[in-house]
């Protein structure tokens, strides 16, 4: 199974066309590609449009003399997150593949916000239609999804409706369900009650009010008492940090540690739903990003910036704080917290000015049930007088490295407003 992707990896090549994939929140999307693709496809509001930020008086010809970078042909679809296109069916995809051939397209960029659900759907459909039939290693949508996960990312395709859509468009069987179920039951006492679970992590209690007797009679089939079964998520199998659990947002994919007893259910960055993500810490199959300094693979939370890991940054700036007991294992990489001096896992640290502190020392950390979200101001991490000064500084800067650093700091303190401002400036520079 492929680890989680970053950037715009080449997923497959067929009929002389290279098909790439990526997500805006994972340093992907056509604007990050060089050279640019011939065609870019993605959801409306997510795929970045090609436009110039310069404005000229009507009738002035100087506007035609502005140098612009090459931009691809763009296809924007009305396509909600965790869902399927609202007005696109099989005929569209068949014609799209034909258009790619007749217009001599040699490279295609598929994308969405995270590069998982909607991107996975695009990849599945294009792979089935473009790769020769005698090279198909799948016979149904479930196996096709697994193929894309193996060659691209294990998070590809995220909703049951997406798997069904793939099967319908390609006119193939749906196959084994490859999605963690999220639906509504309609034929029993659970009618109109939403529930969500992963089939591999479900526990069943025969009687909600008698769990102790349930454990004593383990192995008996059925409940025999006419009472409803309780379906609940099993707790994470293990945690790297005692009394803390790693969570990830389903929408923007932001990671953050929270106290195990925390009841906060929404993301601080985008207000999306969060879920336990301890599996991303696994050394062999977990989510990883590449450090350009040491060429190593690290969990996204172990990265100081999009290009450098915290280990390399500390080695250059504060080596006494770096403790590498087993460098090749996530559980063997530590940092001495700048606040307490205690050794903590590197993945459990956050930026605090020019140092790293334990995640539970951050003011935004989800400590308990009574946690209340506090407003984070731009002044909390930038020595600026007011918002106008900050916006002006960003709007004039051409230093991409500085902007990326400020974006990372904004993300660390969950400042959505500043993240948007920096993102807009980065888009201007790339165009």
Image (spheres, rainbow, N blue to C red):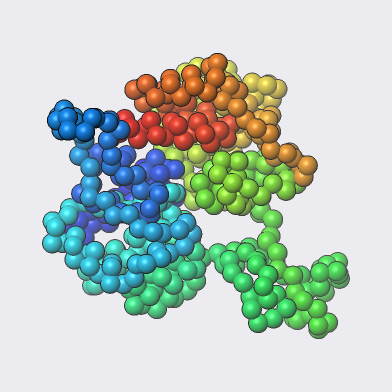
Picture quadrant where residue 202 is located: bottom right
Picture quadrant where residue 243 is located: top right
Residue at the front extreme? 58
Residue 13 lies left or right of residue 287; in this view the side is left
What residue is at 68 percent from the left and 30 percent from the top? Answer: 363
Q: Is residue 413 visible?
A: yes
Could you tell me which quadrant the C terminus lies in? top left
Could you tell me which quadrant the N terminus lies in? bottom left
What residue is at 86 percent from the left and 69 percent from the top? Answer: 210
Residue 48 lies left or right of residue 418; in this view the side is left
Number of numbered discs: 0
What residue is at 69 percent from the left and 81 percent from the top? Answer: 188
Q: Is residue 145 above or below residue 106?
A: below
Q: Nearer the viewer, residue 88 or 82?
A: 88
What residue is at 49 percent from the left and 59 percent from the top? Answer: 82
Q: Is residue 342 above or below residue 170?
A: above
The x, y position of residue 218, in whole percent, is: 78, 73
The x, y position of residue 394, in whole percent, is: 42, 24
The x, y position of residue 194, in whole percent, is: 65, 67
Q: Is residue 58 above or below residue 214?
A: above
The x, y position of residue 70, in whole percent, is: 20, 39
Q: Is residue 148 visible?
A: no
Q: Nearer the viewer, residue 296 or 148?
A: 148
């Amino acid at each position: 199974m492929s680890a989680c992707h970053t950037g715009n990896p080449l997923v497959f090549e067929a009929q002389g066309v290279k098909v790439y994939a990526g997500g805006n929140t994972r340093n992907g999307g056509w604007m990050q590609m060089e050279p640019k693709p011939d065609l870019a496809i993605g959801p409306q509001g997510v795929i970045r449009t090609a436009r110039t930020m310069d404005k000229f008086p009507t009738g002035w010809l100087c506007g035609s003399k502005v140098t612009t970078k090459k931009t691809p042909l763009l296809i924007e679809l009305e396509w909600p997150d965790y869902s399927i296109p609202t007005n696109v069916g099989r005929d569209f995809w068949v014609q799209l593949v034909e258009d790619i051939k007749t217009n001599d397209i040699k490279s295609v960029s598929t994308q969405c916000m995270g590069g998982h659900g909607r991107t996975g759907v695009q990849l599945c459909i294009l792979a089935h239609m473009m790769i020769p039939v005698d090279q198909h290693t799948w016979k149904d949508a479930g196996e096709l999804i697994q193929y894309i996960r193996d060659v691209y990312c294990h998070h590809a395709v995220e909703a049951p409706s997406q798997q069904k859509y793939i099967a319908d468009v390609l006119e193939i069987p749906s196959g084994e369900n490859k999605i963690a179920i999220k639906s509504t039951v309609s034929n029993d006492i659970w009618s109109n009650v939403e529930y969500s679970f992963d089939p591999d992590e479900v526990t069943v209690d025969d009687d909600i009010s008698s769990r102790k007797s349930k454990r004593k009679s383990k192995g008996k089939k059925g409940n025999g008492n006419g009472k409803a079964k309780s379906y609940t998520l099993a707790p994470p199998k293990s945690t790297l940090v005692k009394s803390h659990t790693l969570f990830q947002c389903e929408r923007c994919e932001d990671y953050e540690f929270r106290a195990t007893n925390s009841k906060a259910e929404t993301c601080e960055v985008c207000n999306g739903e969060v879920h336990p993500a301890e599996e991303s810490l696994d050394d062999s199959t977990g989510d990883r990003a590449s450090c350009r300094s040491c060429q190593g693979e690290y969990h996204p939370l172990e990265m100081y910036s999009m290009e450098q890991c915290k280990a390399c940054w500390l080695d250059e700036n504060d080596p006494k704080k770096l403790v590498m007991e087993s460098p090749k294992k996530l559980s063997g990489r530590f940092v001495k917290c700048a606040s307490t001096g205690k050794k903590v896992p590197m993945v459990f640290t956050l930026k605090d000015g020019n140092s790293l502190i334990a995640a539970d020392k951050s003011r935004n950390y989800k400590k308990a049930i009574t946690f209340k979200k506090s407003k984070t101001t731009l002044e909390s991490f930038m020595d600026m007088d007011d918002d106008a000064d900050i916006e002006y500084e960003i709007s004039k800067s051409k230093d991409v490295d500085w902007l990326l650093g400020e974006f990372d700091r904004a993300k660390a303190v969950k400042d959505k407003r500043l993240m948007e401002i920096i993102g807009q400036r980065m888009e201007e520079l790339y165009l």
